[in-house]
Structure formats: C-alpha cells, structure tokens
Image (cartoon, grey):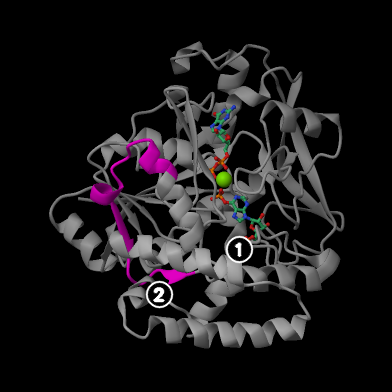
Amino acid sequence: MALDVLLGLQWGDEGKGKIVDVLTPKYNVIARFQGGPNAGHTLEFNNIKHVLHTIPSGIFRENTKNVIGNGVVIDPIIFKNEIDKLKQMNVAIEENLFISKKAHLILPTHRLLDAASEKAKGKNKIGSTLKGIGPTYMDKTGRNGLRVGDILTNDFKEKYDQLVEKHAKLLTFYAFDYDLAPAEKEWFESIELLKKLTLVDSEYFLNNELRNGSNILAEGAQGTLLDIDFGSYPFVTSSNTTSSGTSTGLGIAPNKINNVIGIFKAYCTRVGSGPFPTELFDETGKKIQEVGHEFGATTGRERRCGWLDIPALKYAIMINGATELSMMKADVLSGFDTIKVCTHYKINGRLVDYMPYDICDADIEPVYIELKGWTEDLTQMVSIDELPSAMQDYIDFLEDTLETPITIVSVGPNRNQTLIRKQYA
Ligand code: GDP
Ligand code: IMO
Ligand code: MG
C-alpha cells in the first residue's frame, strides 16, 4: 500500500534498469513517470541482455503490472520496436502493460526539431539523444502537444497535420533539410499498434491500485543532475527526473511516497555535453571506461568517466529525500591502488561543498581524499561479508559522509550479482 521511488542520483545510466528488475518481486506495479526513449535501461538475466527505452523494467517478471505514466513522452516507432522484441521473447504485453492516455506523443517532426536545434547550437549543443525529447516537452508546456488519448479521436489526423504544419514553419527558421514521408508512414503504422494496447486513465488506475493494497515502484529515467530545474542547466533533459516528478508524472500525491531509493555508481559518468567537475582525461578515466563498458545504451556514445563527487551526491540526496542508496558497479573499481573521492570543490581559492549556481561557467577544482584500493574480483561474490576490507571501508566512508544507508551493493550487470547489505525497509 505504498509508493516507493527508485531514481538516479548522478547523470543517468546508474543502473536503474537492473535494480528495478531485482526489486520488482516486492512490488505489484512498476511505473515510469518521466522521460522517454532518451532512456536506455539495461537488464541482464538467464544469459539475456535487454535494453528498455519506454517500457518499465518490471516487464520481464510475471504478474507485475507496468504503467507508462502521463509524464512520459512516447515515440510510437521506438515503442513498437520495443514491443516487437518483447513479444518475440513471449513477454505478456497485452496483460501487463498499461499506457496513460495523458502521455504525450513524439512526432517525427519533434525529432527533426531536436536535430535542427542541436545543429544550430554548434559547439554549445546539449548533446541530446536526438530522440525529440526537448521539442515534445516544449509542445506539452506550450499546450500544442498530441497525447496518446488523441489517437482514439476522429480528428486525430487533423490535429497531427496542424502540429506538423507548425513544426514545418519552425524548421524553415532553422533552414534544416528533411524528408518526412518514410518516418511519417512508419509512425502511423505504429499508432495502429498503440491503439490495440491497454490505454488507461493512469492516475485513477494507480490510485486504485494503492487503495487496493498494491505496492508501486516508480522508476526514474535519466538522473538528478539532468533534472530540468535542478540539473546543470542548460545541459539537462526536459523533465523533472527527481522524486517530486513522481507526483506530477503519475498523479500520485506526495504524501503517498514512502521510500526513495537513490542509485549511484561507485564513480561518475556523463554522456553528452555539460559540466563534470571530477571528469578524468587520463589513463585512469580510460580504464574506468573500458572496464565499466561505459558506452551509451541508447546512442552508443562514449560516456565520460571520473571519480565520485560527494557535493553532487549530497545535493541529489537532499533534492530527492533519498532514504536509502544502491551503489552500482563496485566491481569496476577493483585493481586501482587508490580510489579518489571528491569531498569539496575549490572555486576561486574557496572551498565549497555545495553545487554552485554557475556550475557551467565556474572554474571548479575538485578536492580529493584518497582511499586504499582493492584487487579482488568482486563479480563472483554472493555475500556482503566477502567484500575486501578496503572496499568495506569505502562503503562505510560513503555511508557516514552521505548520512544515508547503503542497502544494496551491485557487483556485476546480472540480476544475481546483487549484494543486499542491509535489509530493505
Ligand atoms: P540505467 O539507464 O540507469 O538503467 O543504466 P544503463 O543500463 O544505461 O547503464 C548501466 C550499465 O551498467 C548497463 O550496461 C548494465 O548492464 C551495467 N551494470 C549495472 N550494474 C552493474 C554492476 O554492478 N557492475 C557492472 N560491471 N555493470 C553493471
Ligand atoms: P537513462 O534513463 C544518460 C542526456 C543526454 C544529453 C541530455 C539531454 O538511461 O539514465 P535529451 O535527449 O534528454 O534531450 O538529452 O541528457 N541523457 C541521458 N544521459 N542517461 C540517460 O537516460 C539520458 N537521457 C538523456 O546525453 O546530455
Ligand atoms: Mg541508461
């Protein structure tokens, strides 16, 4: 009878998909509340590796309802591809997937606008995933958007044409060449599939579930430092990725939120442009990237890598009200003599431990402490007690500094490579 939230505390790709899949047996419903196909959530089990973009990560577990909430933006083409793949794996889509009628649709022209806007920005580009996310949320707040429920109305094609006409004018402004016809055809074919799925008034659906005693887990996409309000603006995504986004993105009141599980990697990564105070440009950064396979699940781009950033993590814990933490990819740090952790930033000679407003422009020098590394391979370990003592010290140090319990330690991509450190509340 509770809503828990699981979300990323860094710049995305923390391993949310994996942990949602691990925790799903404790929940009746898994719900996505924001973002769209800019997300790539990887799950691994039974020798299967699967990347989900729009569909919640509870979809592989039997008897679990998966809801795409009103706060999500859906590209019908990408969505259809996802569904086709899942159907090949005999996943019960018809029975277990529910889509909010209020979720907004990404049109082919939204993708074109995303590309045109990025091109026009030149070297100041956001490094967007080019999935049309920004333009779709712009049409949502501009009150021009098309929603899933609209596909059931008689004048859907007229509504679509009107919006495309507006986009065509905008694209003239960008002087951006394009051929819309092939994508448009595929888009309308995919809309036909969407019509056959279960479209719901998700706010009623979810609140009824709560009333009937269900436990719901809200699955975040992206990460706190990409939040439209609290991230490193303008190098952010276009939605509220933080815990408050759950209420607006699902229609569940804030007083129904119970646990907030914050996920972080044992180091930091970022894909796309924007500030990254602890970024490493040396061999250590390359090693983390190689060992951690740090390449985007959606775009395949190289992820920038760096040491853990405590001021950023504390900020994320504060904004989200995180009640517990999952530490991911601990195994990747095996083999370093020392592990560095940034405890403060030095800005203009002053030590600070908060995220400055001008993070994009400030000259930030990270101040590190060094902790002893470990050499043991963690990936086969099955209990927290097996972890080397240097690693235990690393965890204890972080827990003390962050003043929040670390309940899960992940030591590999597989569902089974998950160590429960403290009993999940
Ligand atoms: P998400 O977007 O937060 O769901 O994360 P991604 O799927 O984009 O990126 C996380 C990547 O790390 C995926 O390739 C996962 O399979 C992998 N992964 C997750 N947890 C671990 C872990 O503990 N160790 C290692 N080595 N890989 C992990
Ligand atoms: P998951 O859910 C990592 C980044 C992009 C870009 C910025 C804006 O897998 O953690 P957008 O396409 O949203 O307009 O891009 O946000 N970004 C992500 N980075 N993981 C993600 O999702 C991301 N979704 C968007 O790289 O810098
Ligand atoms: Mg990802």
Which residue is depicted at the point 44% across and 55% down?
Answer: 80
* Rendered view: 405 above or below 161: above
Residue 349 position, x and y percent, is: 87, 54
Between 75 and 140, the one lying in front of the other is 75
Please check the rendered image and state whether residue 355 is part of the magenta-colored stretch, yes or no. Answer: no
Q: Is residue 198 left or right of residue 14?
A: left
Q: Is residue 233 left or right of residue 328?
A: right
Between 51 and 151, the one lying in front of the other is 151
Residue range in magenta is 85-105
Q: Secondary structure at mark 2?
A: loop
Q: Secondary structure at mark 1?
A: loop
Q: Which label was assigned to residue 59?
A: none
Q: Is residue 416 left or right of residue 2?
A: right
How many numbered tags mark residues here? 2
Distance between the alpha carbons at the discs numbered 1 and 2: 20 Å
Which residue is depicted at the point 54% across and 27% down?
Answer: 396
* Rendered view: 368 above or below 177: above
Q: Which residue is mark 2?
A: 147
Residue 196 position, x and y percent, is: 29, 61
Q: Is residue 229 visible?
A: no
Q: Which of pointers 1 and 2 lies earlier in the amino acid sequence?
A: 2
> Which amino acid does the dot numbered 2 rest on?
Arg
Q: Which residue is mark 1?
A: 237
Q: Is the CB of the residue bearing disc 1 within 8 angstroms of ligand 2?
A: yes
Disc 1 residue crowd, few under 14, some 14–19, many 20+, Cα 10 Å: many
Residue 75 position, x and y percent, is: 49, 63
Residue 213 position, x and y percent, is: 15, 50
Between 369 and 114, the one lying in front of the other is 114
Please check the rendered image and state whether residue 91 is part of the magenta-colored stretch, yes or no. Answer: yes
Which residue is depicted at the point 51% across and 55% down?
Answer: 318
Q: Specify the quadrant of the image occupied by residue 169.
A: bottom right
Looking at the figure, which quarter contains the C terminus?
A: top left
